[in-house]
Image (cartoon, grey):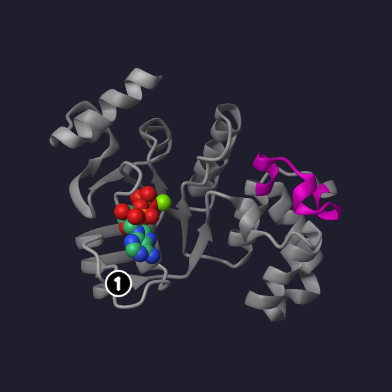
Amino acid sequence: MSEIICELNNVNFTYRGTDKGVKDINLVVSAGQCVGLLGESGCGKSTLAKCISGQQKGVLGDIKCGKIGYIFQDAYSSLNPSKKVGWLLKEVIRYNNKSELSRADELIKKIIEETELDMSVLEHYPNELSGGQRQRIAIACALLSNPDILIADEPVSALDVTVQKQIVTLLKKLNLKKNLAILFISHDIKVVKELCDYIYILKDGVIVEEGDAKSIFENAKSEYTAALLDSSYLVK
Ligand SMILES: Nc1ncnc2c1ncn2[C@@H]1O[C@H](COP(=O)(O)OP(=O)(O)O)[C@@H](O)[C@H]1O
Ligand SMILES: [Mg+2]
């Protein structure tokens, strides 16, 4: 058995005064695994991600999770627009790992290579770059904090299809090369299918189905999963 990086047992959370939230969530991400959390918009995916990363108060149940690197749908909002990319990356090292500051240039060069960017991006402001480049920089920032797990919440949903594919390919490479655990959150079954080994299906805050990617796609047990599969094939 590989090491468990993130484990949720009976996690419950409800937004105060509503019936919205997540219910009885049990979920495991092991070392080197790329786990998908799939469900339609509004089903509670981001809520669960926020519960895991400690951004939500009043969460019940048991959450054990290693250090998280977080990636959002909109990289632009997570990157300070008034600073050049080189400064932003260095700031991540300064914040997370001051002892490494003396070799910041070396670390940044390595992370730029790993995220398949060009060193010239360091001299640019986030708004001077493409959406795909910005998402690569957000990934670079997350990696520079030395995470045990990447939680990527709809990281490609704002990108056009060609760029989506490039970012998904990059995440898969990082997953395999660095044995990096990933929790990949998406409403898009096609993207999840490309990337994930194991999948949880979320509906109205509840996990309605889970399993190896292959079994989910070949033999969906719940009607909801079957419907998700159907609609994605229709819009193909
Ligand atoms: N701060 C909040 N207060 C009350 N309800 C919320 C809040 N944030 C999200 N919700 C509701 O919780 C449900 C799940 O939202 P969310 O986790 O963002 O879904 P997803 O990420 O799957 O699209 C939705 O019905 C949403 O309207
Ligand atoms: Mg969301």
Q: Regarding ligand 1, which quadrant of the image does it lie in?
A: bottom left
Q: In the image, is 195 to the left or to the right of 135?
A: left
Indicate the quadrant where residue 85 lies: bottom right
Indicate the quadrant where residue 160 lies: top right
Q: In the image, is 210 to the left or to the right of 52?
A: left
Kindly state the secondary structure of the residue where label 1 is placed: strand
Q: Would residue 34 be visible to someone looking at this image? A: no
User: Measured from the top left, where is residue 188 in percent x and y?
Assistant: 39, 35
Q: Tell me the quarter of the image containing the N terminus.
A: bottom left
Main SS of residues in magenta: helix
Between 139 and 102, the one nearer to me in the picture? 139
User: Measured from the top left, where is residue 116 in percent x and y?
Assistant: 69, 42
Between 159 and 92, the one nearer to me in the picture? 159
Q: Residue at x 27, y 28 (%)?
A: 229
Q: Residue at x 59, y 27 (%)?
A: 162
> Is 125 one of the magenta-colored residues?
yes
**Disc 1: which residue:** 63
Amino acid type at mark 1: Ile
User: Measured from the top left, where is residue 150 in percent x and y?
Assistant: 48, 57
Q: Residue at x 29, y 37 (%)?
A: 213
User: Measured from the top left, where is residue 142 in percent x and y?
Assistant: 59, 60
Between 63 and 32, the one nearer to me in the picture? 63
Q: Tell me the quarter of the image containing the C terminus.
A: top left
Q: Would residue 119 be visible to someone looking at this image? A: yes
Above/below status of 69 relative to 34: below
Q: In the image, is 183 to the left or to the right of 69?
A: left
Residue segment shown in magenta: 121-134
